[in-house]
Image (cartoon, rainbow, N blue to C red):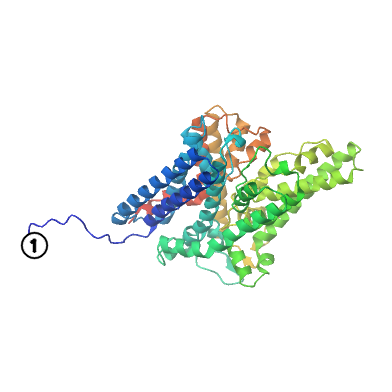
């Protein structure tokens, strides 16, 4: 190039880890979703809603293109760029997808819309919409679609980001001892796995592997619900909520309004697989169906559900004996099904409510203590699933360790190794479990104290904190018996709950890893 010639454009050289491409790709996905919703609103002759979504589609496309060009020239080059991109997605993504709600719903502020879509994308299922029937159907479908996208992102993130960093439940499995073979504790270090592929390559690999089974489950669930008697639109929305374990209500009555055990059974058939780890399904698809029987988290889920159902049913049975209503066999069967459905719904953190749940309490004349459902929501589902909570493997290991410590009170010299299936649990694994539980409890207490400063009662603040940190939004309205429990909250309280949703979906160990000084080293 001769002297004096100014080069005004330089070719973009792709550098960095690929995390910068994830953010721009998310905006393009949002743009495609906006465009589809614009077509849906146009098809049902809701022209105003269609125009809003069309404008949002154009804006998201332009913003995504600009962001891609900027970040490709100045890539994210920190140690855990994929983790950083994920938390930016959960913070900024709901703000982008919330624009149509703030524009269309009357007297619905941007913070209200942000709360609603944060709840959708983190698969929490907490809603602050007063009358869902007054909302345009396209917005209801958009909220459900964002919940389905949030569930898919959580699965991709588990395989592409959490697994290489050994967090999100993988930190325990990474240092389990198989029989007598001990794995190196260095597997906990992010640097041992993060250099194999960049974040974008891992995300593409995970998305390609999961997209067909995930969409297949949604379509199959929708068809099953429609065949069971649910209207097509509601069946589609509830299918998105079931596979993503979100649990949004499409109408005021929710699933209980159908009063159909068949519809509830269909939901059970899909929320249970959604709460089981992706790795187990992958083995089963390869022909190893015994993987479900061998997986310890599947066994822990069965044990937890059976124990809770037995406890609830016996409690109601004893109450029915006192009220002389044991001759009502149909009521007893309904109470048993109501307890079973609710136990499955809350351990998977879906939060659907059975039509027989209220009948179970009226059958015995006793009010079932909500603390049982709170405990199930805290335990949650399996690692690398759409369910939230502490995760079954952590809760089970903590319970086994507690039993061992109690046994040592009488036999101090006894050596009782803790096992998880065919694996022997190391001290390092238990230490990580303790750290996670401690951080989780600190997050619950800190969130509850912060909420009380906004004027919420102590009990409601505690339940609300557990609801968002376990990504089980319907828990607060159910326990407080107020369907509009989230509506009357202040803007500050809603923003705090949004932070809790993100921390619950990212998990406390991931947040701590992001705050580590090593994260920001280039």
Q: Name the residue tied to disc 1.
A: 2
Say whether residue 106 is visible. Answer: yes
In the current view of this chain or complex, which residue is farthest to the top? 455
At horizontal 47% and vertical 40% (from top left) the residue drawn is 100
Foreground pick, 292 / 176: 292
Image position, residue 478 (x, y; %): 67, 37
The C terminus sits in image quarter = bottom left
In this picture, residue 91 sits left or right of residue 412: left
> How many residues crowd mark 1 within 10 Å: few (<14), some (14–19), many (20+)?
few
The N terminus sits in image quarter = bottom left
In the current view of this chain or complex, which residue is farthest to the left? 3
| Total numbered labels | 1
Q: Is residue 391 above or below residue 478?
A: below
In this picture, residue 431 sits left or right of residue 377: left
Image position, residue 87 (x, y; %): 45, 49
Foreground pick, 255 / 388: 255
At horizontal 44% and vertical 65% (from top left) the residue drawn is 193
Image position, residue 28 (x, y; %): 42, 52
Identify the element where label 1 is drawn.
loop
Say whether residue 403 is visible. Answer: no
Foreground pick, 222 / 97: 222
At horizontal 67% and vertical 60% (from top left) the residue drawn is 298
Image position, residue 339 (x, y; %): 76, 46
């Amino acid at each position: 190039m001769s002297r004096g010639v100014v080069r005004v454009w330089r070719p973009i050289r792709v550098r960095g880890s690929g995390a910068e491409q994830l953010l721009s790709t998310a905006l393009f996905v949002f743009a495609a979703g906006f465009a589809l919703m614009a077509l849906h609103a146009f098809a049902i002759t809701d022209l105003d809603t269609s125009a809003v979504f069309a404008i949002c589609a154009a804006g998201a496309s332009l913003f995504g293109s600009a962001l891609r060009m900027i970040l490709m020239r100045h890539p994210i080059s920190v140690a855990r760029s994929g983790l950083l991109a994920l938390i930016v997605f959960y913070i900024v993504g709901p703000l982008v997808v919330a624009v149509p709600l703030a524009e269309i719903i009357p007297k619905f502020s941007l913070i209200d819309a942000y709360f609603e879509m944060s709840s959708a994308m983190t698969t929490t299922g907490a809603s602050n919409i007063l009358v869902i029937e007054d909302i345009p159907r396209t917005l209801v479908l958009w909220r459900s679609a964002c919940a389905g996208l949030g569930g898919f992102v959580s699965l991709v993130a588990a395989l592409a980001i959490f697994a290489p960093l050994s967090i999100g439940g993988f930190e325990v499995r990474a240092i389990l001892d198989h029989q007598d073979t001990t794995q190196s504790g260095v597997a906990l270090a992010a640097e041992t796995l993060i250099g194999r592929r960049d974040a974008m390559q891992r995300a593409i690999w995970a998305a390609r592997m999961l997209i067909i089974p995930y969409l297949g489950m949604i379509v199959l669930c929708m068809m099953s619900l429609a065949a069971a008697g649910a209207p097509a639109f509601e069946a589609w929305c509830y299918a998105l909520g079931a596979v993503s374990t979100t649990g949004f209500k499409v109408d005021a009555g929710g699933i209980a309004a159908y009063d159909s055990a068949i519809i509830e059974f269909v939901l059970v058939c899909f929320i249970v697989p959604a709460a089981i780890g992706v790795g187990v399904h992958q083995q089963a698809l390869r022909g190893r169906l015994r993987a479900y029987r061998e997986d310890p988290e599947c066994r822990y889920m069965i044990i937890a559900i059976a124990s809770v159902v037995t406890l609830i049913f016996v409690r109601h049975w004893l109450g029915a004996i006192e009220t002389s209503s044991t001759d009502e066999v149909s009521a007893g069967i309904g109470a048993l099904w109501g307890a079973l459905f609710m136990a499955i719904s809350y351990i998977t953190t879906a939060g659907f409510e059975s039509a027989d749940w209220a009948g179970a309490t009226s059958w015995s004349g006793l009010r079932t203590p909500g603390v049982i459902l709170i405990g199930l929501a805290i335990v949650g589902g399996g690692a690398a699933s759409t369910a939230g909570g502490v995760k079954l493997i952590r809760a089970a290991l903590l319970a086994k360790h507690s039993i061992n410590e109690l046994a040592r009170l009488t036999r101090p010299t006894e050596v009782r190794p803790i096992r998880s299936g065919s694996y022997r649990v190391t001290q390092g694994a238990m230490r990580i479990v303790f750290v996670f539980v401690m951080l989780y409890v600190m997050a619950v207490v800190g969130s509850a104290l912060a909420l009380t400063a906004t004027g919420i009662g102590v009990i409601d603040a505690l339940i609300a904190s557990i609801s968002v940190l376990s990504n089980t939004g319907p828990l607060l309205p159910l326990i407080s018996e107020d369907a509009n429990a989230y509506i009357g909250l202040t803007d500050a309280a809603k923003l705090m709950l949004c932070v809790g949703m993100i921390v619950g979906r990212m998990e406390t160990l991931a947040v701590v890893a992001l705050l580590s000084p090593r994260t920001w080293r280039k």
